[in-house]
Amino acid sequence: MINEILWFELLIGCFLLIMLAYTLWGKTGLYAWVAIAIIVANIQVMKTIEFFGFVTSMGNIVYGSLFLVTDILAEVHSKKDAQRAVWIGFFVLISVTLIMQLTLFFVPHESDFLSPHLAAIFSLLPRIAFASLTAYFISQFHDVWIFAKMKKRFKGRFLWVRNNASTMLSQLLDNMIFTLIAFVGVFSWSIILQIFFTSYVMKIVVAACDTPFVYWAKKMRAKH
């Protein structure tokens, strides 16, 4: 049960860090979290774990927290601010991927003992990054678009419905794109299907749990 306990601890920890960043720096804090999350999630996803008896990749919580950030920005600030966050994440992941690929070309000194480990992690990053960028770009803009549409349709009411519906639909789209690009040819189809279904269930849980934090952010904004 250690993985399950750690998973829920990570979930709460990420959401509280987002709220702390928002409290301290407002929109800038949320943009900073986007940069952190997009890097960490694409490193975490290289690690597979067993969760309630099923195989899945990590990164679901940290990546899922990006949807909380864009929903807060779209609800409390504007659609334009949410779209800016998406572009920031896109730029950060491309930049990190290019920098780390160049880093791997440097010839290590004979005293170096970490280079093989860096290569083991970041040599996979281009494929992971491509899968993530494609899924991220499509799903995040879909999330911002559908959230804004629903906000207008419901005249700002039913936040819990708008937040969950937009995130769950966008996460399904994201999960399909990322899993197919990142894992086909790497794992067997049985493992890929386990990763897909388990990770999507996990993302649904993340989406359901992040709703109170959107309300919290909205209440914080109203006080200022």
Image (cartoon, rainbow, N blue to C red):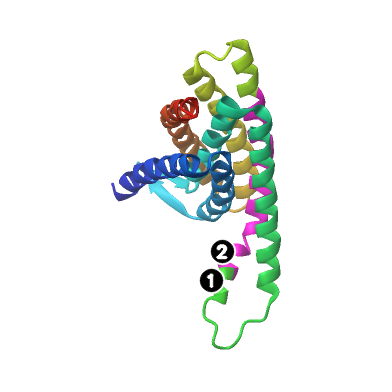
Considering the whole magenta stretch, tell me its main secondary structure.
helix
- Farthest residue, direction bottom: 110
Relative to residue 89, is residue 168 depicted above or below?
A: above
The type of residue carrying mark 1 is: His
- Left or right: 3, with 195 as reference point: left
Question: On residue 162, which mark appears?
Answer: none
Q: Residues within 10 Å of mark 2 (few under 14, many from 20)?
A: few
Residue 80 location, quadrant? top right
Q: Nearer the viewer, residue 155 or 195?
A: 155
Relative to residue 205, is residue 191 depicted above or below?
A: below
Point 30% across, 50% down: residue: 2
Q: Nearer the viewer, residue 152 or 38?
A: 152
- The secondary element bearing badge 2 is classed as helix
Point 43% across, 40% down: residue: 15
In the image, residue 6 lies at what x, y percent?
A: 34, 48
Q: Decide: marks 2, 1 in contact (CB < 8 A)?
A: yes
- Farthest residue, direction top: 154
The type of residue carrying mark 2 is: Ile
Magenta region: 119-145
In the image, residue 66 lies at what x, y percent?
A: 55, 39
In the image, residue 21 lies at what x, y percent?
A: 48, 44
Q: Residues within 10 Å of mark 1 (few under 14, many from 20)?
A: few
Which residue is identified by label 1? Answer: 117
- Farthest residue, direction left: 1
Please check the rendered image and state whether residue 54 is part of the magenta-colored stretch, yes or no. Answer: no
In the image, residue 26 lies at what x, y percent?
A: 53, 39
Which residue is identified by label 2? Answer: 121
Instruction: Report whether residue 159 is seen.
Output: yes
Q: Nearer the viewer, residue 33 or 108?
A: 33
